[in-house]
Image: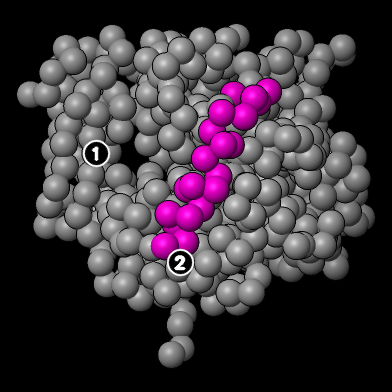
């Protein structure tokens, strides 16, 4: 069957998305005209134009928030065969960089390129994640520009819920997580990132799926993404070439179908899930030795990047497989799932170094008694945007009490550095000596974007909008508000742990309408 996405599935911000400020410019006249509301149409008028006077003239515009899309340039007059260089950036420093500088790249979505600019034109350029754009004249011409808008693509949902509290700092974190998630719903799928990693990564997908049900209910982006991964991955290979991501596929299937009540989609896919478990069972000996028989270049054991190549990665992989087996057994008996839980049980008590590994051991069934001190040691130290939800949830299971302060410490730190969406990664030690993403670093100051990052996301290749970073929203819904959702809202319970927040409220889209939940002083009202 022919599949396509339709324009009505997206809102392209036709209302003018104006820059909120001009960060820098040179060899321009009337630059403030770019900040003024005016008709977005080519005309013969010489009023309200900004003049690029000679080669090297440039302007840097700040649109105030992360967007997925490009820029629309409306010109009046162009005197000569003119070229502009357009450079997008999620931070001001990235916007002012060149390819190769601090690992600046054009990977996945070009963000630094030249374009031809004709006279009397209205053209759009670029499809990436950005907040800032630098426009530079490369030829010895004069160009009169009327508008430079940001054009952002955002999905349209039939229903859209909300979560809010009486704590304004927490509300900013919730809103930023929700916006991060929404930006990554593109072209009918759920991407990992809007600048780089415009892929469907199955493990990274989990929190995006769960959050999407709380905000948008059952939606085709989820089923499109899971079906795409299945179609791309024969049963003799692993999802995304990572064994643990095949386990994540099952977790995603079970969680989505349980939360939405979509039993039809589960039935359509259970044969593929059972093939995954059969393959896992065949890869693990009776005494728990795991051999996926993959080439060394593949990631045989992967929990997350910081644990890669360590014994924690093996333990974490075993825990993910156990979680997948437990989720599946909640809805369907399976001999391979029971075998896997028996063979992998010793991994629950393996020593580990990282908080996320211990968290997954707890989520897989480890006795959580006494584990809160390990998970809360150093507050937000050892957190990552990908793993935050799982560490927070395990901490709650272990009787922890510092979850709210850790949320504010960790996610609030990104907001304090100018974040309008949450990042691919962030570590608390990046704060010392660094400035905000909407400023160029001063002498002796660290560039929080260009000077940090690791593994595959060093420097400016680091994404400042990654869907996996939205998981804090699920923790607030499931633990603080205390909502456990099943069968598309036909079955649910509310057991709040407000952590001192006076009021929490959510409007959750469900199969037959809306579920309204409000908690005041720790009690549902």
Q: Of label 1 and label 2, which has the lower sequence position?
A: 2
Q: How many numbered marks, from 0 up? A: 2
Q: Is residue 170 left or right of residue 358?
A: left
Q: What span is colored magenta in the figure?
A: 335-356
> Height in image: 231 above or below 165?
below
Residue at which label 1 appears: 484
Quarter holding residue 170 = top left
Kindly identify the residue that appears in the image at 53 percent across and 17 percent down. 375
Estimate the x, y position of residue 171 in percent, counting from the top left. 36, 24
Q: Is residue 90 left or right of residue 170?
A: right
Task: Say the numbered circle drawn on residue 473.
Answer: none
State yes or no: residue 340 in magenta: yes
Q: Residue furthest bottom?
A: 1
Residue at which label 2 appears: 273
Counting other residues with Cα less than 10 Å from the Cα at mark 1, is it few (<14), some (14-19), or many (20 or more)? some
Counting other residues with Cα less than 10 Å from the Cα at mark 2, is it few (<14), some (14-19), or many (20 or more)? many
Estimate the x, y position of residue 70 in percent, counting from the top left. 62, 55
Kindly identify the residue that appears in the image at 25 percent across and 67 percent down. 263
The one nearer the camera, 27 or 457, is 457
Kindly identify the residue that appears in the image at 91 percent across and 45 percent down. 100
The one nearer the camera, 204 or 14, is 204
Is residue 78 visible from the viewing direction of this image? no
> Height in image: 208 above or below 378?
below
State yes or no: residue 494 in magenta: no
């Amino acid at each position: 069957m022919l599949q396509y996405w339709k324009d009505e599935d997206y809102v392209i911000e036709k209302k003018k998305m104006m820059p909120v400020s001009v960060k820098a410019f040179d060899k321009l006249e009337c630059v403030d005209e770019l900040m003024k509301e005016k008709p977005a149409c080519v005309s013969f008028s010489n009023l309200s134009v900004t003049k690029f006077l000679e080669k090297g003239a440039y302007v840097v515009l700040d649109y105030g928030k992360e967007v997925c899309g490009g820029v629309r340039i409306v010109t009046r007059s162009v005197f000569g065969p003119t070229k502009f260089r357009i450079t997008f950036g999620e931070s001001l420093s990235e916007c002012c960089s060149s390819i190769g500088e601090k690992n600046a790249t054009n990977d996945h979505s070009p963000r630094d390129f030249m374009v031809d600019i004709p006279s009397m034109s209205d053209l759009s350029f670029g499809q990436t994640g950005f907040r800032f754009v630098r426009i530079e004249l490369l030829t010895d011409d004069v160009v009169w520009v009327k508008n430079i808008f940001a054009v952002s693509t955002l999905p349209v949902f039939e229903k859209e819920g909300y979560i809010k509290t009486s704590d304004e700092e927490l509300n900013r974190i919730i809103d930023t997580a929700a916006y991060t998630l929404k930006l990554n719903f593109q072209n009918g799928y759920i991407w990992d990132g809007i600048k780089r990693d415009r892929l469907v990564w199955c493990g990274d997908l989990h929190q995006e799926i769960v959050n999407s049900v709380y905000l948008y209910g059952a939606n085709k982006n989820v089923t499109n993404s899971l079906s795409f991964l299945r179609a791309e991955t024969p049963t003799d290979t692993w999802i995304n070439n990572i064994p643990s991501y095949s386990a994540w596929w099952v977790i995603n299937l079970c969680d989505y179908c349980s939360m939405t009540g979509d039993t039809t989609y589960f039935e359509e896919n259970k044969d593929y899930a059972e093939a995954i478990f059969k393959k896992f069972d065949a890869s693990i000996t009776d005494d728990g030795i795991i051999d996926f028989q993959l080439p060394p270049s593949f990631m045989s054991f992967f929990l997350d990047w910081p644990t890669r190549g360590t014994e924690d990665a093996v333990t974490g992989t075993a825990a993910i497989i156990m979680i997948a087996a437990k989720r599946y057994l909640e809805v369907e008996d399976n001999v391979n799932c029971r075998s896997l839980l028996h063979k992998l049980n010793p991994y629950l008590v393996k020593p580990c170094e990282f908080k996320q590994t211990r968290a997954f051991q707890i989520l897989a069934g480890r006795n959580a008694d006494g584990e809160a001190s390990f998970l809360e040691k150093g507050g937000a130290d050892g957190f990552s945007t990908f793993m935050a939800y799982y560490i927070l949830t395990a901490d709650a299971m272990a009787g922890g009490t510092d979850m709210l302060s850790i949320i504010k410490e960790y996610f609030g730190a990104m907001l304090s550095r100018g974040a309008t969406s949450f990042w691919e990664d962030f570590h608390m030690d990046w704060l010392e000596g660094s400035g905000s993403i909407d400023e160029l670093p001063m002498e002796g100051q660290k560039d929080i974007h260009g000077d940090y990052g690791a593994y595959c996301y060093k420097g400016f290749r680091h994404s400042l909008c990654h869907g996996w970073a939205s998981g804090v929203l699920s923790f607030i819904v499931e633990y603080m508000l205390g909502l456990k959702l099943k069968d598309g809202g036909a079955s649910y319970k509310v057991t709040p742990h407000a952590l001192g927040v006076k009021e929490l409220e959510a409007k959750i889209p469900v199969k037959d309408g809306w579920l309204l939940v409000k908690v005041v002083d720790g009690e549902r009202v």
